[in-house]
Each structure stands twice: as structure tokens, then as C-alpha cells.
Amino acid sequence: MNANLAMNIELVTRNTAEILTKQELENLLASKTRPSVYLGRAITGPLHMGHLVSLSKLLDLQNVGFETIVLLADIHAALDDLKSKWEDLEIRREYTRKAIELSVEWKEKPKFVVGSDFQLKNDYQMDIFKMSTLANVQTAMHAASEVTRMKNPKVSELIYPIMQALDEQYLGVDMQLGGLDQRHIMAFAREYMPKMGYNKNVELMMPLVPSLKGPGVKMSSSVYGSNIKVNASEEEIKKTIQEAYCPIGVMQDNPITAIVSLLILPTEGKLVIARDSKFGGDLEITSAKQLEEVYTSKALHPSDLKAAVTEYLIRKLARVRNYFESNKDLLHRLGHNFE
């Protein structure tokens, strides 16, 4: 393996939770100079900081030559127990695209594709029917279980993983990127796409940022205080981070240390933590390993770490915040969850 390929593999795989499979990824990088990847975003609610981990991974992929595609999964948003009503899809597409564009300092803007632009065509619909004759109800429910509500499963929620699998073929990509909660659907795609006569693609999964409210509460757009919207005000960011779960010396399920490891260090390369000289003076964190050492040894206090993370998020999300502050009518039309 040449040095350049090894560097590309290291950049693509850093901070990932799981890859199906790493060998296939290495083969892809070795055989294609311009592979393609897509990240799907069901437009079910506000874009929040947890989504930035996968979006930032697209930057790594762009840096090694990937063509990057963001799927605005509008039909998926309605299929998931109507988390987005059919009549709201257009405005939610508009919000989501703008929020993604402004949340990341892109090397090159990803290509945005709207799901309903191709998912309603005859060939795609016929493939839904074909795959539905191959997969049983239990398999489809298992595939969708970590993503859709599944409280009183609707038929639409069983269609959801079938469509997500087919999206890989109809977008013409080599790889899908998503959070670890997508694993069951990605495994479903790898099992059933070859049965349809299509390629089995690489699946790249990123870890999930723990809820800001601590263990036992999922980070969700619908759970207040569990996340920070990308268009949150400075006051909201300060208050939410100040109240966030961050036990001293503990990294497990710690959302604040996870933000540093999964978002700040990969994109910024370092985090400078301002401290009074009597507490050791300013501290520069340049790696996840260093963060773990100083935090678990209790040489870094949660309040100092929270202050640095707050400052970063205020700066990082300024473009999104400023845009939506100037377009409050759009947020108002979306509803109170987005404001």
C-alpha cells in the first residue's frame, strides 16, 4: 500500500464507529480516483449539533477526492409516522438545505438531491414492489427499528428501509454515510441489494453524540435540552451547555467531551481552554487521547471545558444563526420547534 493511499484511508476512517467493510473501503479507495458517497437527511426536524458529526465527515471525504451528495429525504420524513406532514415538505426542504450549507465551511458544496425528484419515478417504484416481495415484515421492522418511531408501526415505516437501500442505486454512489443508528438499515441494504441485482456498497457509520441531558435520554430534535439547534441563539447555547451533563473525570456518555473529540478536534485541529493561572493557565488540547488523559485525571474541570465548547459553538454556528435571524418568517412558518 502506497503512502498516499494509507493517508487517505486513515483520514476516511478516523473517528468512525463501524465500516461495512473496511477491506471494501480500502479496495474502493485504491481503485477509484473519484468515488462517490451520499449522506441522507430526513427533514423531520431542526438540524442540530449531533448532525454536524456526519456532515463534518463529508469534509474528510472531500479531502480525499470523494464526490459528496446530500439527500434531502423528504418522502422518508413523512413515512416516519408523519414526523413531517406532507404539506410541510417543501418548506422543510428549504430550511434543511440552507442549514446544511451554512453549518459547515465546505471545501466544495455537496450536491443536493431531493428524494421525491427521483423516488416517485416508475423504475424506482417498481423496485420498491420487487424488494417488498423479498423482505419479510420482521426483517423490515428490525431494519427500521433504530430510525423510525415504531411505537405502533405503520406500513410506511416498513417501506422506509427499502427506499433507503434503493437510494444507493438510484443516486449512483459507492458508499453511504450515516450515524451508528443507521446500522440496521445499512446491513439491510447490503443483504438485499445483491438480491435485486445491484451492487453491495460500503457503509460508513459515525458515532452518535450523547444527549446533553445525560444517559437515558436520546438526543432528539423533539427533546428540549438534549441538543443545540444549529440556528440557536448565543443565549440558548450558553444556557444549554451550562446545564449539560458533564460529570467530572468521566468520559463515558459525556456529551461535552464527545463534542470536542468528534467535532472540534477533527475540524479545528485543537481546542484552547482559557483558565486562570491559579488553575494551571490556558490549556491547548490537540488530540482525543490528550483530552482523555487530562479529563479523566481531573486536571481539567467541566466548567472550563464547557466555557471553551460554548465559545466554539457560538463561533461555529454564527453564519447559520445570522441567516435565520434575518429570516425569522421562515422559522415561524416551520413552527416553534425550529425557532
Image: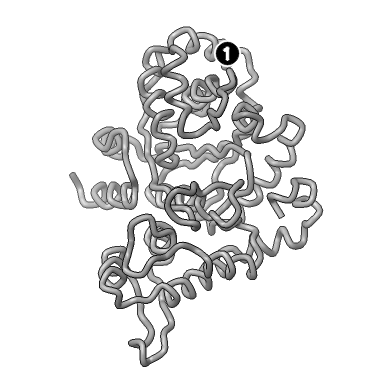
Position of residue 326 in the picture relative to residue 303 (left or right): right
Quadrant in the rendering for residue 282: bottom left
Quadrant in the rendering for residue 196: top left
In this orientation, does residue 330 appear? yes
Which residue is rendered at x = 41% and y = 77% of the image? 272
Image quarter (top left, top right, bottom left or bottom right) of the C terminus: bottom right
Q: Tell me where residue 168 appears, x and y as whole percent.
A: 47, 27
Secondary structure beneath dot 1 equals: helix
In this orientation, does residue 264 appear? no
Q: Nearer the viewer, residue 266 or 156?
A: 156
Q: Tell me where residue 124 appears, x and y as whole percent.
A: 57, 17
Q: Which residue position is annotated with label 1?
A: 123
Q: Is residue 200 above or below residue 216?
A: above
Q: Tell me where residue 126 appears, x and y as whole percent.
A: 56, 10
Quadrant in the rendering for residue 45: top right
Q: Is residue 218 above or below residue 200?
A: below
Which residue is rendered at x = 44% and y = 38% of the image? 37
Q: Tell me where residue 39 appears, x and y as whole percent.
A: 49, 39
